[in-house]
Image: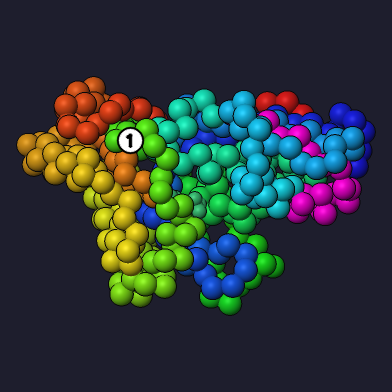
Amino acid sequence: MSGVGARRAEVVAHANIALSKYWGKRAGAGNLPAVPSLSVTLAGLSTRTAVTFDEGLARDELTLGGEAAHGLPLTRASALLDVVRRAAGFTARARVISRNDFPTASGLASSASGFAALALAAVRAAGLPWDDARISDLARRSSASAARSLFGGFVELPAGPVDGGEETFLPARPVAPPSHLDLAVLVCVTTEGSKAVGSTAGMIETARRSPFYDAWLTEAPRLHGMLREALAAGDLPRVGELAESSALAMHAVAFAGGTTYVGASTLEILARLRALRSDGLPMWATMDAGPHVKVLVPAARVEESRRALAEVPGVLRIVEARPGPGAWVVES
Ligand code: PMV
């Protein structure tokens, strides 16, 4: 490793929301998605992470939002740091300090921005000359959605090869800049609690128990391909419709396998959204591994959309977000 100056890096990465959903993993090692996904990286909702490799440390240390983390979050961070240490040829443990600037219970997955930030900070702190694609591939091994947060705007993560494994190189890639669609995302928060079933457990259950899993494996790439085309054409209504279809299909396949993320408020919002839409307000819904509804609206209609959604019973608060940049180094 080069001098002391190369041992610390501090970075910022933003959350992203999948328009076509990743749900399901390839069998075997490597955390390879079974279906392609396409997301939008969101400005403002960010994780700031500092990594310092320090020979004086006996073990890795992780602080999340001011509190020392142990157990699974620390194990997952250490697994990523181990890959970086092996590549850089040193054994120093790391101190990782990470903080989200959005409320952790806002319903926006912190694992995407969290692992994107950790991967970039660890690689830069170790002084490795890796490009964004290589760092995206590293982040993907911890959380596939994190691979997409390395890049700004609209970002695609292909499905992994059927016969892939630990050795497979699979980064996300940017497909359009943040300004490509005049889009705003209104995150309707329906509960302040954390989700009951994590995404990995939900995906495993879906593959094991859902009678519709094979149908999902056929339908998800089809929706994804159409969404890509609609995005390339700059057709926001079509992107919105397809994003909603992808989310509904993902939740249906999970539901049929016994994993339920939607709650009563989720359904309330969906019903109201459809009524508002038929009254002429363009808006489309998407949900991830939790009950919150992320509503896609044209940026020009954001105020009236926000007012209408705020009245729906079960909406606790609304977080507004716009397409934004990829992960960046603050200090190294
Ligand atoms: O990257 P993970 O393991 O947190 O899974 C993300 C799954 C969804 O958020 C539901 C969909 C997606 O593509 O982000």
For image coordinates 78% across by 38% down, the residue present is 94
- Horizontal relation, residue 62 to residue 222: left or right: right
Q: Is residue 278 magenta?
A: no
For image coordinates 64% across by 37% down, the residue present is 69
Q: Residue furthest bottom?
A: 163
Q: Is residue 91 magenta?
A: yes
Q: Position of residue 263 (x, y in %)?
A: 26, 46
Residue 298 seen in the figure: no
Q: Considering the image in quadrants, where does the C terminus appear?
A: top right
Q: Position of residue 144 (x, y in %)?
A: 54, 54
- Horizontal relation, residue 12 to residue 50: left or right: left
Q: Which residues are magenta?
A: 82-99
Q: Considering the image in quadrants, where does the N terminus appear?
A: top right
Q: Position of residue 202 (x, y in %)?
A: 42, 59
Q: Position of residue 89 (x, y in %)?
A: 88, 51
Displayed quadrant of residue 183: top left
The three-letter amino acid code for the residue at tag 1 is Thr
Q: Is residue 184 above or below residue 213?
A: above
Give the labeled residue for mark 1.
191
Label 1: how many residues lie within 10 Å, few (<14), some (14-19) or many (20+)? some
